[in-house]
Image (spheres, rainbow, N blue to C red):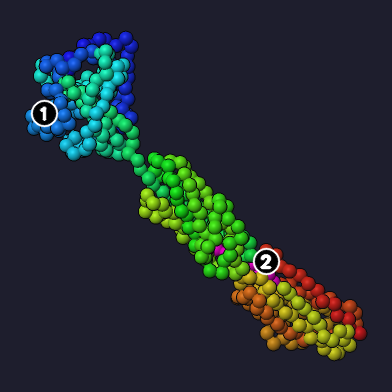
Amino acid sequence: MKIRFFPALAALVLVSSVAAQTAPAEHHRATHLGNPATRFAGPLNSPADLRSRLSDEKLRPDFAEILHQWGWPGKWDDFVAAGLTNEISEWEIPVGGTMPFMSSREAGRPVCLRNVTWAGTNPIHAYAFTFHSNGRIWRCVTPKPCSNFFVEDVGPEPRAGLAIDCAVPDQVVVGRTVKVCLNVHNTGNIPEPLAVVTLPVPDATVVTATIGGGVVTNHAVAWILANVPPNATEQVCAILKTLKPTALEFDATASSARVAPVQSSCETLVAGIPAILLEKADNPDPVSIGSNTIYSVKITNQGTADDSNVQVVVTIAPELVPVSSAEGKIEGQVVTLPVIPRLAPKEAVTYQITARGVAAGDGHTKFTLSSGMLEAPIYAEESTTVY
C-alpha cells in the first residue's frame, strides 16, 4: 500500500469504545495503494488469498503485533478463527473515509498507523469479515491491492436478558387488599419483543384487580409485555384479598423465547386484629339488704387474631360486699379474676361473682379490663340498687 503522510491540521484524539484507551494524536492521509515497501503483504485476488495470509505462520506474528500496537481489546484466537472460517464479503472504503488504524510496514517491520483517511480518487475495493470477541462485534477490512488491514468496532454483541423482582408490604391487615408488584427488567442491550410474566395466586386468595393488563386464569395472573426497550423496567401489579390471617408467599416468573425463565419471590403476613368485648350483668337487681346478687362477667375476643394476658378486675360497690368467686381472688372490695394467657379469635370466657347487699343505695360496681393488645385498660360500670 503506497501511503503519503501529511501532518494533521489539528490534533485528533480517538477513543476506543471498549478499551477507553486514548490514541496518540496523529492523522494520516493515504492516496495510493500497493507500494511494496509499505504494503503489509501481497495483493489479494480472492477470499482464499486473505485466508492464506491469516494462516501464514510467518505473517501471523505481524498481524498480532499490529493489533497489539493498536491496543485492540479482543482475543487473538477469535480474530484468527473468524478469518479462517467466517464469510468473507466484498467491501468498499469510500473516498474521504477514515479508518481507526491501518497496518503498514517500515523497513519491513509491522507498523500501526492511526486515523488514516483515504484521500484517493476512487473508493478502495476490499474484503471484509465480521466476528465477535469480548462481547463486541468487530469488522476486519483488508484492501485488495495491498493486504493492509484494519479492525473496526461495529458495536456490542446482541444480548438478551431478563430479571424480575417481587415487592409486597411486609404485613397487611386481614380483610384489606394486598398489592403485589413485579418489576420486570430488560437487562439485555436489545429490545425484548415478547416477555410473559406469571404470578400464581395462593389458595384462599382472590384477585380483585390487576395493573398493566394482567389476565386471571388457572389460579394465576399473567401479563404479556411487548417491545421492552434495553435497560428498561416495566411494572405490573395484582391486587388480592384474603379473609383469614395467614402468610402469603408469591413466586413470580418472567420468560421469553430468548432467555431462560427467571424467578423472584416475596411474602407478606396477613395479620388478624384482636377485638375484646366485655359484657357484665347483675341478677337480681334490685337486691335487698342481706340478700345476694350475682355479677356475670363475659370476655369475648371478637377479632381475627389472638389476644394475650387478658384480665378483669372488679371493684364491688360499697353498698355490697363480695362473698365468693370460684375463680377470682377477693381482697376487700376488689375481686381479681384470673389472667387468660391466650384468648383465641371468637373464644369467650365467663366468670361469676356473688355479692351481698349491706347498705341501701345505688351501688356502682366497676370493671377494669386489660390485655396485651390494649394500649390502655377498658372501664365499665354496673349499677345495682340495694334496698
Tell me which amino acid carries mark 1: Leu
Identify the element where label 2 is drawn.
loop
Q: Is residue 71 visible?
A: no
Residue 71, image x, y percentages:
24, 28
Identify the mark nearer the N-term, 2 or 1.
1
Residue indicated by mark 1: 59
Q: Say which residue appears at 76% left-offset and 70% top-offset.
A: 379
36 in relation to 128, above or below: above
Indicate the position of residue 370 as horizontal and vertical percent values: 68, 70
Give amino acid for label 2: Leu
Along the viewing direction, whichever of 152 and 1 lies nearer the viewer:
1
Could you tell me how many numbered marks the image carries? 2
Can the viewer see residue 107 in this picture? Answer: yes
Nearest the eye: 77 or 13:
77
Q: Quadrant of residue 261?
A: bottom left
Quarter-of-image position of residue 19: top left
Q: Nearer the viewer, mark 2 or mark 1?
A: 1
Q: Residue at x 33, y 33 (%)?
A: 155
Mark drawn on residue 156: none
Q: CA distance from mark 2 to mark 1?
A: 88 Å
Say above or below: 84 vs 359: above
Q: Quadrant of the C terminus?
A: bottom right
Per the rendering, the mark at residue 374 is 2
Element assignment for label 1: loop
* Image location (x, y in percent) of residue 186: 43, 45
Residue displayed at 44% across by 56% down: 253
Q: Please give the range of residues in magenta.
A: 269-276
Residue furthest out toward the bottom: 291
Residue 280's spot in the image, x, y percent?
77, 78
82 to the left or right of 371: left
Residue 274 magenta-drawn? yes
